[in-house]
Image (tube, rainbow, N blue to C red):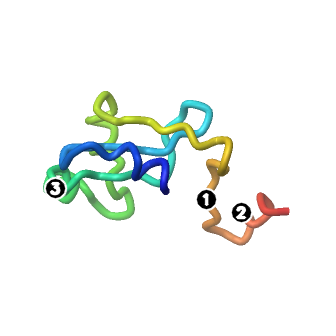
Amino acid sequence: VARVRGAYRSRTSLVAASYDGERGHPVLFGADRWAGIAATAVGDQGARAYLREHRDAITLVECSDVAEAYDIDTAQDLSHLE
C-alpha cells in the first residue's frame, strides 16, 4: 500500500501494484477519476471496465518482492498460506 500511495502524483493519478509486471491490487484512483469509475462499475465487476479502458494511464508499481498476487476469497484459497 505504501508503494502504491507513494506513486500518487495528482487527482488524476491511476496507480496499481504489479506482480511480475501484471496489474494487481491495491489500486489507487485519484479523485478526478471517481465519477468515471462510478459510471462504469456494475455488479461485482467494480472498476474492471474502467481499468481496461484506461490501461495506458496506469502507473504500475512492482510489489512482487513484498507480496503475492493471489486473493484469499474462498476456503480453497487458504492453501496459498500453507
Q: Measuring from the top left, give residue 74's x and y in whole percent.
A: 66, 69
18 vs 8, left or right, is right
Q: Measuring from the top left, give residue 22's x and y in whole percent.
A: 54, 35
Query: Is 72 placed above or below 10 here?
Result: below
Label 1 SS = loop
Mark 1 crowd level (few <14, some 14–19, many ≥20, 10 Å Cα) = few
State the CA–CA distance, disc 2 to disc 1.
Answer: 7 Å
Query: Is 41 placed above or below 20 here?
Result: below
54 vs 35, left or right, is right
Label 2 SS = helix
Q: Which residue is rendered at x = 35% and y = 52% of the image? A: 28
Mark 2 crowd level (few <14, some 14–19, many ≥20, 10 Å Cα) = few
State the CA–CA distance, disc 3 to disc 1.
Answer: 26 Å
Viewer-nearest residue: 82 or 48: 82
Snapshot quadrant of residue 63:
top right
According to the picture, the residue beneath numbered tag 2 turns out to be 77
State the CA–CA distance, disc 2 to disc 3.
Answer: 31 Å
Q: Residue furthest bottom?
A: 75
According to the picture, the residue beneath numbered tag 1 turns out to be 71
In contact (CB < 8 Å): disc 2 and disc 1 = yes
Query: Is 30 placed above or below 58 here?
Result: below
The amino acid marked with disc number 2 is Asp
Picture disc at residue 34: none
According to the picture, the residue beneath numbered tag 3 turns out to be 39
Q: Which residue is rendered at x = 32% and y = 46% of the image? A: 8
The amino acid marked with disc number 1 is Asp
Q: Which residue is rendered at x = 30% and y = 43% of the image? A: 14
